[in-house]
Amino acid sequence: MTDRTPFPTIAAKLLDTVEAALPKLRALSEPQAARPRAAGKWNPKQIIGHLIDSASNNHQRFVRAQEGAALTFPPYAQEHWVACQHYADRPWEDIVTLWHAYNVHLAHVISNIPEDRRDVPCVIESESPVTLGFLAFDYGEHLRHHLAQVGVLR
């Protein structure tokens, strides 16, 4: 897949990934989900919380980039978002349920992005724009990277 892959295909792969990961995430116990991968690293609760934050930010990007000729969106301060939402203090099942529901919805949103919006320039983290097509593609890549960190994808 690339940033030129049709949106419904990107969405289908996202949905397949989410559905494959769900039972593995639910199989983690509360103590396992609360254990950091290493000293100073996020635990699975915080990693999946980060993916919820990513879903939230990208949801806005996917929708807003369809409104006009270009999108400028503020950067995402991931450490701040994860810390101030206290994901480590939430029940694991609540985090997983929200993550799953949000990503099922995002797969629906992505699958319905019109192809003529693919090349909308989006400025987010730097002065160099990326396209809406890239954001949709990269969202799934980012999600899979972090699911691998939790150990539910290889």
Image (cartoon, grey):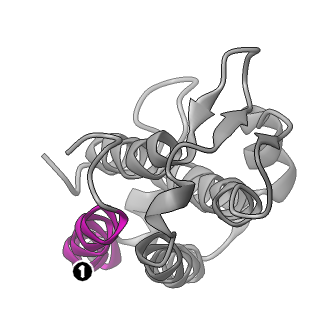
Identity, as a three-letter code, of the amino acid under mark 1: Pro
Does 78 sit left or right of 22 as displayed?
A: right
Q: Nearer the viewer, residue 131 or 91?
A: 131
Q: Position of residue 101 (x, y in %)?
A: 52, 85
For the stretch drawn in magenta, the main secondary structure is helix
Residue 100 lies within the magenta run: no
Measured along the vertical axis of the image, is residue 72 above or below residue 15? above
Does 95 sit left or right of 44 as displayed?
A: right
Element assignment for label 1: helix
Q: Which residue is mark 1?
A: 23
Q: Position of residue 1 (x, y in %)?
A: 19, 45
Range of the magenta residues?
7-26
Instruction: Name the residue at 21% across, 73% down.
Output: 16
Residue 10 lies within the magenta run: yes
Instruction: Name the residue at 26% across, 76% down.
Output: 27
Q: Position of residue 133 (x, y in %)?
A: 46, 47
Badge 1: residue crowd in 10 Å (few <14, some 14–19, many ≥20): few
Measured along the vertical axis of the image, is residue 151 above or below residue 100? above
Q: Nearer the viewer, residue 50 or 131?
A: 131
Q: Nearer the viewer, residue 147 or 91?
A: 147
Instruction: Name the residue at 52% across, 73% down.
Output: 99
Residue 9's quadrant in the figure?
A: bottom left
Instruction: Name the residue at 67% across, 16% down.
Output: 128
Q: Position of residue 154 (x, y in %)?
A: 12, 45
